Structure formats: structure tokens, C-alpha cells
Amino acid sequence: MLLSVVNYFVMFRTLAHIGSARRPTMFVLQHKAIAVACVYTAGAAILAIFAYMLVKCERSERSGLFAALILTEQVILFFVFYVQMSTSLTLFVLRNVDPHFSLFGVTLFTWSTAQFQALNPIRIMVMSPLLALLYTKLAKNGKDVPVAVKYAFGFAVVAAGFFVYAASGNYAVNGRVSSWFMVGGYGL
């Protein structure tokens, strides 16, 4: 890290003239109303394209396009919730979660706010091989799980985790909830 800091100061003057002029993207990002209008316009355009395709396609293709639209919406919602991990949930942990991890009244250790973000990757590393084995076994037995059901299951698990966080407010003491709620929410 020290080498990087030294490199920055050595190269600062060399790189000072490099950069780009202001672009329209920066203008849009600096004005919330314009950014919101762009998002709504893009959403309306995508829905209009899907509607046009649904009207113009063969009857046999219609169900596939409708399924693609639903899956696309579901993926967007999934990632909206997923991104909350590094934003809203981090602030929730910082402000509203008791950092002491206790079991039967004995504090085992104290969490830092950033450590809670490691719970999701750990869960993914543990559950991925188990789900792969389960889906493979089901497929071999002729009970293959459709992709849409897998998407719905993933979305339901994410939603259940957020319900755990919401329910934690009922058990807050002095505005702080037990870190077990975060473990439970990330553990789903």
C-alpha cells in the first residue's frame, strides 16, 4: 500500500493532463429529475418493445416472450434487493445492530460492520454445491426443476431475508437488534 501511495505522488504530475472532458452522462447524474426521467423513458421503451414483439410474434412464441419478460423483471428486482447489501443493510448494521455476538448471554466476539457483508458470500459458497447436487439428482430422477422455478425460489429466499430484517425491529433494545437477525437474514 505504501508503494501505491508513493507511486501516486511520483506520477501525479505526469497524469494530471490525462482525463476526459465533461460528458452528457455527468450532466444527467448531477440532475436527479433528468436521471429519473431517463430511467422511466428507458423502462417505457423496453416495455413498448416487448409489447410490440408480443403482438407481432407467432402464437407459439408468445408464451416464451412473456416468460422472458417476467424473468427479466424478476432479475431486476433481485438485483435491486441484492445491491442493498452494500448500501442500506450496511447502514442498518452500523446504526441499528448490536455488534456483540452472544450465545446464552456470553459474548463470543464483536462484529465490525464490514464483517456482516462476508455472510452472503459464505452462504453462496456453502449452498451452491448443495443446490447443484440437489438439482442434478432431481434431473436424473426425471424431476428437473425449471429455470423459472429456480428464479422464483431465489427471489423468495431474498425476500424472506428482508422479512427477517423487518421483524428484527420488534425485538430492538435501545434501538439496536441482535446480530443474530443479520446472521439469520443472510443465512436464508
Image: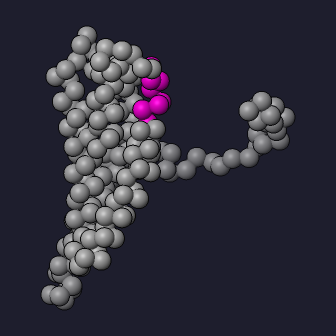
Q: Is residue 146 above or below residue 109?
A: below
Magenta stretch holds residue 115: yes
**Residue lying at 39% horizontally and 16% vertically, measured from the top left:** 107
Which residue is at the front of the view, 58 or 37?
Answer: 58
**59 horizontally vs 154: left or right:** left
Residue 1, given in percent of the width and then of the height, sits at 74, 33
Residue 36 in sight: no
Residue 16, given in percent of the width and then of the height, sits at 76, 39
Segment colored magenta: 110-117
Q: Quadrant of residue 171?
A: top left
Magenta stretch holds residue 70: no
The C terminus lies in which quarter of the figure?
top left
Residue 183 in sight: yes
Which residue is at the front of the view, 16 or 71?
Answer: 71
Residue 29, given in percent of the width and then of the height, sits at 44, 43
Q: Is residue 172 above or below residue 185?
A: above
**Residue lying at 44% horizontally and 51% vertically, measured from the top left:** 125
Which residue is at the front of the view, 70 or 24?
Answer: 70
Residue 73, given in percent of the width and then of the height, sits at 25, 60
**Residue lying at 22% horizontally and 59% vertically, measured from the top left:** 152
**Residue lying at 38% horizontally and 39% vertically, measured from the top left:** 85
Q: Residue furthest top?
A: 174
**137 horizontally vs 114: left or right:** left
Count of numbered badges drawn on the protein:
0
| Magenta stretch secondary structure, dominant | helix
In this figure, which colouring scheme has been used for the structure? one colour
